[in-house]
Image (tube, rainbow, N blue to C red):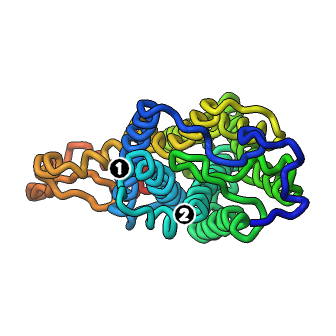
Amino acid sequence: MSLSAEDAPPPGATATWCWGGGRDPPLSDQGETIIGVYLLLLGWLSWFGNSIVLFVLLRQRSSLQPTDFLTFNLAVSDASISVFGYSRGIIEIFNVFQDSDYLISSIWTCQVDGFFTLLFGLSSINTLTVISISRYVKGCLPHRAHHISLGSVCVALVLIWITAAFWAGAPLLGWGRYKDRGYGTCEIDWSRASYSLSSRSYIVSLLVSCFFLPVLLMLFCYVSIINTVKRGNAMTGVGLSDRQRNIERDVTIVSIVICTAFILAWSPYAVVSVCSACGLLVPDLTSIFTRLFAKSASFYNPLIYFGLSSQFRRDVKALLPCVRRGGGGAKQRGGGRKYSPPTPEPPCTPPPANQEVFFIDMPRPSEADPEFECDRL
């Protein structure tokens, strides 16, 4: 394929580490095996953990709150990354299809793999950004919390996928380019920005719009929430009980940890990508390790849910057959809580005339239980 004057590297730029002319140099057999085992274990655990999150949410679909659909979308994106971000590397390293390379060379090409990996990765970071905005509105602007409805969340989900599809599809149409870096990694050709004006404009726009701007928004939202909590004014919406405010704060803590883990996983890769785009030397091992570390972002969220959300732990335990058999009572479909059958009440006898009687008005469980109104993670 011939290159235009704009796309051709400048004279003397023959080093593949500087101008992205090919794949990373191969590691030893032992190193490739370690990477293959890492991808296999992390990919399977990521898929398994996010599948549990999806199953829990699907099981409770009748009682989901609007923002729970954002959690569902995040789990879908992470589970998809575990397929497209790991499988191709496993196939290449362990040479699963020894007799034919048709799957890799004709169907599951680098362009296809790069498109879907970037698509689901951008969907994840965009979803985390929308989640942080929703927590900011509920925590710092409770009088506007009614704007976070099912309709607004659906609009946000549509925009999330349209935006991700635009940036992931642009290299397929000639704005930017995907490159096979080996070990199942098909990524944007960052080093091409050093000598191609179109690639430079795409890479700068991609980094600003899809990484730096979302990260700044998440930092602004959660710093604002923390400052509001310090002032003692968090979750002061009208109609919220103390327990409901505590649940909202717990959900916010989970969201903060998830976003922090995502930023920490992707920041080293972003720094290496910027260095490559500027034409700076990046050691091969550093480039490989940052890419592999960024792939682990899809693995953290189920662990965070299980470690920090008591509601999620109860929902997962309710899925276990031994727990379901041992409960004995009827189980509410929406929340995974068990209720014993009602016991017959004794006949009502009038109290003595000289005895003072007190009546206590107890609200119904469906009205008093805050988990019917608050988000779950």
Q: Quadrant of residue 223?
A: top right
Answer whether residue 220 is visible to the viewer in this image: no
Specify few, some or many for label 1: CA neighbours under 10 Å numbering under 14, 14-19, or 20 or more: some
Residue at the image point whose x is 56% and y is 52% from the top: 239
User: Callout 2, which amino acid?
Assistant: Thr
Q: Residues under labels 2 and 1: Cα distance? A: 25 Å
Residue at the image point whose x is 82% and y is 63% from the top: 3
Q: Quadrant of the N terminus?
A: bottom right
Residue at the image point whose x is 69% and y is 43% from the top: 218
Residue at mark 1 = 48
* Viewer-nearest of discs 2 and 1: 2
Which residue is nearer to you in this view: 6 or 229?
6
Residue 83 versus residue 16 in the image, above or below: below
Of callouts 2 and 1, the N-terminal one: 1
Which residue is nearer to you in this view: 136 or 100?
100
Residue at the image point whose x is 45% and y is 37% from the top: 32
Q: Which secondary structure, mark 1?
A: helix
Residue at mark 2 = 109
Find residue 342 and report its horizontal and vertical position in percent: 15, 57
Q: How many marks?
A: 2
Answer whether residue 236 is visible to the viewer in this image: yes
Find residue 293 and report its horizontal and vertical position in percent: 55, 36
